[in-house]
């Protein structure tokens, strides 16, 4: 199955545990396919960080608009983006 799901932004996605819980839910209900729970969680977390940074700073309104809906593609994003999501997840403090 190939496709994508559009997930609305939620403030809870600024929390790693909330992202993991949401990822598990999305995978269990079949909303997302061919991704691990960690891949989904990292993407949710990264998008939330960018979205709320733009919101708080007032900068980059087009980026904020673009990240307001998280477009999860079955199988995951490009390898470079997946690497960025993983790196950001690793360097950020737990739960933040």
Image: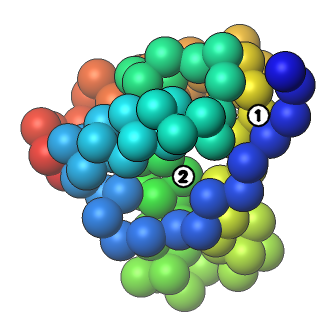
Give the mark, 1 or 2, whose residue is nearer the N terminus. 2
The reply, left or right, for residue 19 in relation to residue 10 is: left
Q: Residue furthest front?
A: 29
Q: Residue furthest right?
A: 2
Is residue 88 among what the camera can see?
no
Q: Quadrant of residue 91?
A: top left
Q: Is residue 62 above or below residue 90?
A: below
The reply, left or right, for residue 90 in relation to residue 39 is: left
Q: Disc 1 marks which residue?
A: 73
Alpha-carbon distance for marks 1 and 2? 14 Å
What's the residue at 43%, 56% (across, down)? 49
What's the residue at 49%, 23% (across, down)? 39
Quadrant of the frame with the N terminus: top right
- Determine which of the numbered discs, if any, sits on residue 62 in the image: none
Q: Quadrant of residue 65?
A: bottom right
Q: Nearer the viewer, residue 48 or 24?
A: 24
SS for dot 2: helix
Q: Nearer the viewer, residue 54 or 39?
A: 39
Could you classify mark 1 by the number of other residues whose Cα lies within 10 Å: few (under 14), some (14-19), or many (20 or more)? some
**Picture colour scheme:** rainbow
Is residue 8 among what the camera can see?
yes
- Determine which of the numbered discs, if any, sits on residue 47 in the image: 2
The reply, left or right, for residue 24 in relation to residue 90 is: right
SS for dot 1: strand
Q: Is residue 7 above or below residue 33?
A: below
Could you classify mark 2 by the number of other residues whose Cα lies within 10 Å: few (under 14), some (14-19), or many (20 or more)? many
> Where does residue 32 sit, x and y in percent of width and height?
64, 34
């Amino acid at each position: 199955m190939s496709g994508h799901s559009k997930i609305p932004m939620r403030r809870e996605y600024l929390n790693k545990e909330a992202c993991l819980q949401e990822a598990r839910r999305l995978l269990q209900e079949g909303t997302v396919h061919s991704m691990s729970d960690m891949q989904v969680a990292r993407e949710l977390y990264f998008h939330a960080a960018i979205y709320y940074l733009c919101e708080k700073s007032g900068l980059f309104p087009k980026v904020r608009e673009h990240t307001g809906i998280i477009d999860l593609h079955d199988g995951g994003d490009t390898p470079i983006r997946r690497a960025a999501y993983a790196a950001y997840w690793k360097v950020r403090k737990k739960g933040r």
